[in-house]
């Protein structure tokens, strides 16, 4: 596996397996205090320059890169987060 790329495995759960997994996780984890009915909505807007620098660096696998976004949770625009994401190696 090439270490500069992240790989994800996705699995489909049936309802029974989902319920069992939730029950087991509740025994060892706390619920997210920001969740509403067990979930929350995230809206993000990413910024780039006119030359698409952030996009091109991601595609090219540049080891040291950064990107900026604004993000809000649960459709609450009273608090908007400005975030800088940095990747190092």
Image (cartoon, rainbow, N blue to C red):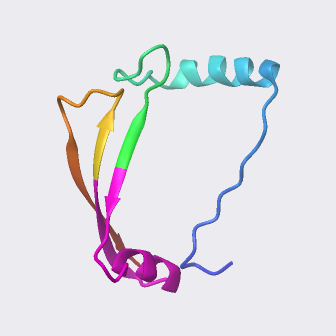
Residue at coordinates 73% horizontally, 19% vertically from top-left? Answer: 20
Whether residue 25 is situated above or below residue 12 in the rendered picture: above
Residue at coordinates 65% horizontally, 58% vertically from top-left? Answer: 8
Quadrant the N terminus occupies? bottom right
Whether residue 37 is situated above or below residue 30 in the rendered picture: above
Give the x, y percent position of residue 7.
64, 64
Give the x, y percent position of residue 4.
54, 79
> Left or right: 70 with respect to 62?
left
Highlighted range, magenta: 45-69
Quadrant the C terminus occupies? bottom left
Q: Is residue 80 magenta?
A: no
Whether residue 65 is situated above or below residue 17 in the rendered picture: below
Give the x, y percent position of residue 62.
43, 84
> Left or right: 65 with respect to 81?
right
> Left or right: 57 with respect to 11?
left
> Left or right: 61 with respect to 66?
right
Q: Is residue 62 magenta?
A: yes
């Amino acid at each position: 596996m090439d270490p500069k790329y992240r790989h994800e495995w996705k699995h489909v759960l049936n309802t029974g397996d989902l319920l069992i997994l939730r029950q087991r996780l509740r025994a060892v984890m706390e619920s997210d205090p920001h969740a509403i009915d067990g979930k929350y909505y995230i809206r993000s807007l990413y910024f780039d320059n006119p030359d698409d620098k952030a996009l091109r660096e991601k595609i090219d696998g540049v080891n040291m890169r950064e990107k900026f976004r604004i993000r809000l949770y649960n459709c609450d625009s009273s608090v908007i987060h400005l975030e800088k994401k940095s990747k190092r190696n």
